[in-house]
Amino acid sequence: MKKIENILIIGVGLIGASLARSIKAAHPDIFINGYSHDEKEIVGAKDLGIIDDGGTCLKQGAEVADVIFFCTPVKVTLALMEEVNSFNLKSDVLLTDVGSTKQEILEQAQIFEKNNRVFIGGHPMAGSHKSGFLAADKDLFENAYYILVPINQKQQKEVVTLQFLLKGTHAKFIELTAKEHDEMTAVLSHMPHLLASQLVERAEELMILFPESRKLAAGGFRDITRIASSNPKMWTDISVSNSNILASEIDRWLVNLTELKKRIIDKNEQALFAFFKEAKDARDSIPVHKEGSIPGFHDIYVNVPDYPGAIAEVTAVLAEAKISLINIKIMETRDDIFGILRISFKNERDATIAMDCLNKKTTYTSFIS
């Protein structure tokens, strides 16, 4: 297996910095360089021990690297790939990325292949509501799927090397083609974000017309549209990068919605029941709380009494157990639950530990739904 002594992380934001932490945890002797156009970002990441060194000179870090990670948005990565290819890289350098779409990236990667350099596409399917190197988390990718996209089947040795380098992520590795990846993520990740955003836009129109509807949107509507709060710049880039597949998916949706509209107009109860029943069966067959194409939310619900200090008591128990929560919300309006505190965690383990602690140290009922 190729010996790795020096790696370069291009882009030390959430994903790049978290990768650096997980690699360092498993391979403490590997020297990690960071690159950013923002010198303050490099200084901050170095001060926190996320990277060993770094700077704003891409050439310097790239030419000594055994492995190079492009941890930047797809559009930025495409430009940087061309720049990096012009450098005097090591002959056996291994290059990879973390982009949310793969066909454009793999097409651009042909420039490396022409120079006998190996590029393997990558996509760790994990994220956070936070951003930047300050949010770096070595456990960010734990139990998440990390998709690898080799250009050809001759790269299996390098795939094994990359998996070994990334063993500290504790991710689940899957190999796909670029086309398979982009089609799957279009349906399972990209379209849900588009539809959630469209729902919120329509709701905003309704709220202007009927201001009271804002209160009604506080319950289940907020849950199903939560992903619409994602970074708009990132989703603009993804939509442009995966435009052909997304356009085809939208056409398919228009056909399906037209058929659904006809069933509703015709009051075809049998066809409508079949539609909802098939959707329910398919949804119920999806594994619960498994990390997938959209970063999961692991929620517990706490039935807290309505008196001052109740919520503070809950958060104090979690703080004592050193459990980090990512969101907390009082469920004011919900179809099926009333008077409940919902607390969200970054992984199932934290949610389970939190529930056990609260059940042992408070008189409140806690459960995972």
Image (cartoon, helix red, strand yellow):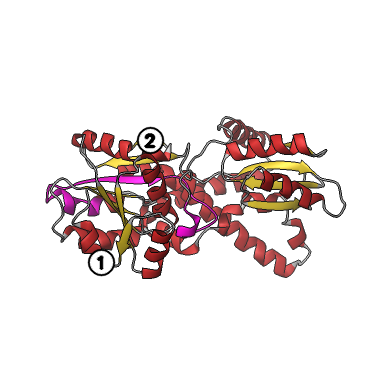
- Residue drawn where x is 63% and y is 39% of the image: 351
Q: Which mark is residue 173?
A: 2
The answer to the question of whether label 1 and label 2 lie on touching residues, with beta carbons closer than 8 A, is no
Q: Residues within 10 Å of mark 1 (few under 14, many from 20)?
A: few
Image quarter where the C terminus lies is: top right
Q: Is residue 369 visible?
A: no
Query: Where's residue 46, x and y in %?
Result: 38, 60
* Residue 138 among those drawn in magenta: no
Determine the residue positioned at 50% across, 61% down: 231
Whether residue 193 is situated above or below residue 256 in the rendered picture: below
Q: Is residue 55 visible?
A: yes
Would you say 94 lies left or right of 77 here? left
Where 52 sits versus 204, above or below?
above
Residue 271, x across and y down, in percent: 63, 35
Quadrant where the N terminus sits is top left
Disc 2 residue type (three-letter):
Phe
Disc 1 secondary structure class? loop
Looking at the rendered structure, the secondary structure element under dot 2 is strand
Sequence-wise, which precedes: disc 1 or disc 2?
A: 1
Report the disc number at residue 284. none
Q: Residue at x 49, y 40 (%)?
A: 292
Mark 1 to mark 2 CA distance (whole Å): 32 Å
Q: Quadrant of residue 336?
A: top right
In the image, which is nearer the foreground, mark 1 or mark 2?
1
Q: Amino acid at mark 1?
A: Cys
**Residue ID for mark 1:** 57
Drawn side of residue 140 relative to residue 322, left or right: left
Quarter occupied by residue 122:
top left
- The tally of labels here is 2
Task: Look at the image and give the residue range highlighted in magenta.
Answer: 107-136
- 115 in the magenta segment: yes
